[in-house]
Amino acid sequence: MKAYIVKPVSRKEADHLVRKHYLHRWPGVAVCIVGLLDSGSCIGTIVFALPPRETAKRYRVRIAWELARLFIEDGTPKNTETWFMSRAINYLHLAHPEVEVLVSYADPSVGHAGTIYRAGNWISDGQTDQERKTPRFDYMVEGKVYSRRSHVPQGAVIQRVPRGSKYRFIYWMKEHEKRRRECAGIMRRI
């Protein structure tokens, strides 16, 4: 691997990379931003954010964070994403020991299957919405998709679009192996 540096960066330093991510926007509440630096330039970023409220309850923890954005400029060596993610998680272990579990999602509608998470020893935890009894919808206005009706501009003509499920992955930060075994047992019972 090149002589990359992994360290916390400011929102300003990472903004150009988040805008290149397929979602083109920041997550709701970013709590930690880690950068991948090459010769002083930020060429990659991982943004950790607060996850949906149900996440901590689902995994029976007090503090859960979401790996909400990961973007690295093209031209880096093979496996740079997995290497970077591993270093970012190591940083979290030291700087934020209160975090008990990480969750992230892979969106098959844009061709993501979670390969990077599997390579990083994350645990597959099914798909979003698999327990729902009623389907969920996004709202489209002139080609732009909104996940909440309240975010749609006032007076806009909307089209409801069925929301597809995403693959969910988790990474235990504390009592690593013990939690992995517990999780495997819980998942088998569900």
Image (cartoon, rainbow, N blue to C red):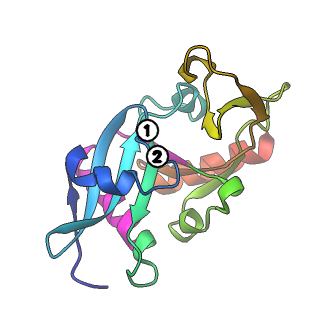
Q: Look at mark 1 in the image and give the residue it sits on.
A: 27
**Residue type beneath disc 1:** Pro
Question: Toward the viewer: 120 or 186?
Answer: 120
- Asked if one can make out residue 13 in the rendered structure from this viewpoint, the answer is yes
Where is residue 66 drawn, in percent x and y?
46, 42
Q: Position of residue 119 (x, y in %)?
A: 55, 71
Q: Is residue 172 left or right of residue 115?
A: left
Nearer the observer: mark 2 or 1; the answer is: 1
Give whichever of discs 2 and 1 has the lower sequence position: 1
- Which quadrant is the N terminus positioned in? bottom left
Looking at this view, is 94 or 29 the one in front?
A: 29
Residue at mark 2: 68
Q: Are marks 2 and 1 in contact (CB under 8 Å)?
A: yes
Residue lying at 40% horizontally and 76% vertically, measured from the top left: 80
| Residue pictured at 62% horizontal, 31% vertical | 147
Name the quadrant of the C terminus: top right
Q: Residues within 10 Å of mark 2 (few under 14, many from 20)?
A: many
Magenta-tinted stretch = 83-104
- Of all residues, the one furthest to the right in this rendering is 133
Q: Which amino acid does label 2 sit on?
A: Ala
Q: Residues within 10 Å of mark 1 (few under 14, many from 20)?
A: some
Q: Left or right: where does residue 142 sit relative to residue 66?
A: right
Secondary structure found at label 1: loop
Judge whether 153 appears above or below 17 on screen. Answer: above
Regarding mark 2 in the picture, which secondary structure is present there? strand
Task: Kindly give the residue lying farthest to the top in the view shown.
Answer: 155
User: Is 117 inside the magenta-drawn segment?
Assistant: no
Q: Which residue is drawn at 58% across and 26% down?
A: 54
Above or below, 2 relative to 31: below
Could you give the CA–CA distance between mark 2 and mark 1, rounded to whole angstroms? Answer: 7 Å
Relative image position of residue 85 (x, y in whole percent) = 40, 63
